[in-house]
Amino acid sequence: MTPMYTRIAQLRTPEQFSEHIRSLGIVLDFDPELLSAPESPLAQPYHLQLSTLNLQLSNRWCVLPMEGWDATTEGKPTELVTRRWQRFGQSGAKLIWGGEAVAVRADGRANPNQLLINESNLSDLAGLRESLIRAHAACWQTDDLLIGLQLTHSGRFCRPTDKKRMEPQILYSHPLLNQKFGLPNDYPLMSDDAIDRLIEDYIVAAKLAQKAGFAFVDVKHCHGYLGHEFLSAVDRKGKYGGSFENRTRFLREIVAGIRAEAPGVEIGVRFSAFDFIPFKPDENGIGIPDQFDTDYSYAFGGDGSGVGINLSEPHQFLVQMEALGIRLVNITAGSPYYVPHIQRPALFPPSDGYQPPEDPLVGVARLINVAAELKAKHPNLCIVGTGYSYLQEWLPNVAQNVIRTGKADFVGLGRMVLTYPEMCADVLEGKPLARKKICRTFSDCTTAPRNGLVSGCYPLDQFYKERPEANVLKEIKGK
Ligand SMILES: Cc1cc2nc3c(=O)[nH]c(=O)nc-3n(C[C@H](O)[C@H](O)[C@H](O)COP(=O)(O)O)c2cc1C
Ligand code: SF4
C-alpha cells in the first residue's frame, strides 16, 4: 500500500506550495519569483581561495557524485560512464563533486563494475575527466570548472567480485546491520594494521588522482561506507574506535599523508551529517524504525532516539576539518542501504526499500536545514547541499533561496542531473523548465543496480529506455 502524498507537480502556484509546506509543519524557505543570470543568486560567482587554488566559480550549481555500476571489471570507464560524465559537463554546473565513487583498492569496491584508481587505469580516468571538460567547453569557458574525484572503500557494503555477493569489511559488530545483512556477531573485524595499510592506499590514490588532473579528492565519509562507519565506531577498541578523537583518526591520517606526498591536491569531505536507526517495511510495506532497547549510539549525528538529530559531533568534525585546512565540505545523510528516505527522498522506493514513512518533502527540508545550521556555525567553509531532486518544479525556487540567504554555498544535484542535466543552464537563462525531463523520483536508477543492472534513468532518458535492460527492469518491477 502506497501512502498518499501530495504530488509536487500538482502544486502550481507559490501559494499552493507554501500551503503544502505549512500543512507538513516543516520549515522550507523558497523564493516565489525566479531571477535569471546575471541577477540570479545562483549566478553569483563563488571565490574559492585554497592553499593552491584561487578560482572564481561562475555559478552555484554542483553535480553530486553518481556511479552507474557500469565500469569494466578492471575498473576502467566504459562508454556508459563516459556518457554520464559528459552529461555532468553539459549541465553547466561549475563544481563537479567527485564524479562518482572510485575505489582505492579492488577488494573495497561496492560492485565488480565500480571504477578503480590504480596505475593501469590512470590514463583512462584522466581521459574521463577530459571528456567532461570537452562537453562543458561546447557551451562554457572551462577555466572556472572545479573537478574532484571521490575516493572510497565500501566497507560493510563491499561486493567486489559478484554483484549479488557481499564481502563485507567491517569496523565493528553492528547489532542491527550485522543481522540485517546476514553477518554473525563474531564476523571478523578489520584490524588496525589493515586500516593503516588502507590509509596508504588512499594516499597513493590521491597522488594518482592529482596526476590524472583532478583538482581535489573527496575522502568520502558518507552513506554507510567505510569512512562513515568510522564515525560511529563507538564500540571499537584501539586507536580507530571509541572516542571522537579515535573515530576521526582515519581522516586525519589520510590528510596528513596526502599533504606530505601529494602537496597541491586539495581535499574535500562528503559526510553523512546525521543518520537514523535502520528502517524496515511494516506489514503494509511502509518504513518503520527497527527496534532497539537502549539508546541508539550508532547514528553519527543522531540524538540517541534513532530518529532524531544532534549535530554536536558533526560540528566538532567540521572544527577538525577547518583545523586540517579542509574547506570543501558536502553535506549528505544516512545511507541508501538502510535509511534511503533520509538520504535520497523519493515518492517511489527502490525494490529493496520501503514505502516512504513521511512525505519526502520532510526529508528534503531536513537535509537543507541541517546544511544551513552547519553553514551558520562554519561560515568559512564552502558548503555543498544535497537532496534537492524531489523538489522537482520547485527546485529552482528553493535553490535560489538557499544561495540568496547563505544557507549553503552550492546546490548539489544528484538524480535530477541524470534525467535533466540542462536544468542548471535553463534556470540561469530564465527558460521555462522542460517538465517531461524532471526527475519524478521513480527510483529506477537505484532499483536497477540493486538487481545487477547498470544504473540510469530508465523512465525518462530515451537512451536508457531503449536499452535491453529496460525490459528486464520492467519484469523485475512487475513481480
Ligand atoms: C544512481 C545513484 C548513484 C549514486 N552514486 C553515488 C556515489 O557514487 N557517491 C555518492 O557520494 N553518492 C552517490 N549517490 C547519492 C547522490 O550523490 C545524492 O546524494 C542523492 O541522489 C540525493 O540527491 P538528489 O536528491 O539530488 O538525488 C548516488 C545516487 C544515485 C541515485
Ligand atoms: S530513474 Fe530517473 S526519474 Fe527515477 S529517480 Fe532516477 S533519475 Fe529520477
Image (spheres, helix red, strand yellow):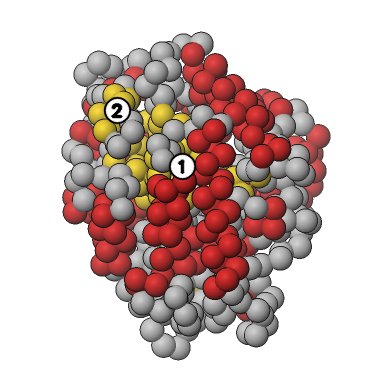
Which sits in the foreground, 351 or 377? 377
Residue at (66%, 72%) from the top-left corner?
181
| Residue at 25 percent of width and 29 percent of height | 47
Specify whether residue 78 is in view: yes
For badge 2, the amino acid type reads Asn
What amino acid type is highlighted by mark number 1?
Ala
Q: Is mark 1 within 8 Å of ligand 1?
A: no
Q: Which tag, 2 or 1, sits closer to the chain's start?
A: 2
How many labels sit on residues? 2
Q: Which mark is residue 54?
A: 2
In the rendered image, the vertical position of residue 112 relative to residue 141, given as above or below: below
Q: Is residue 154 left or right of residue 27?
A: right
Residue shown at 57% from the left, 71% from the top: 193
Foreground pick, 162 / 412 = 162
Q: Which residue lies at the image location 40% right of the left edge and 47% below the top edge?
A: 259
Note whether 390 is above or below 252 in the view shown: above
Q: Which residue is mark 1?
A: 262
Q: In front: 21, or 40?
A: 40
SS for callout 2 = strand
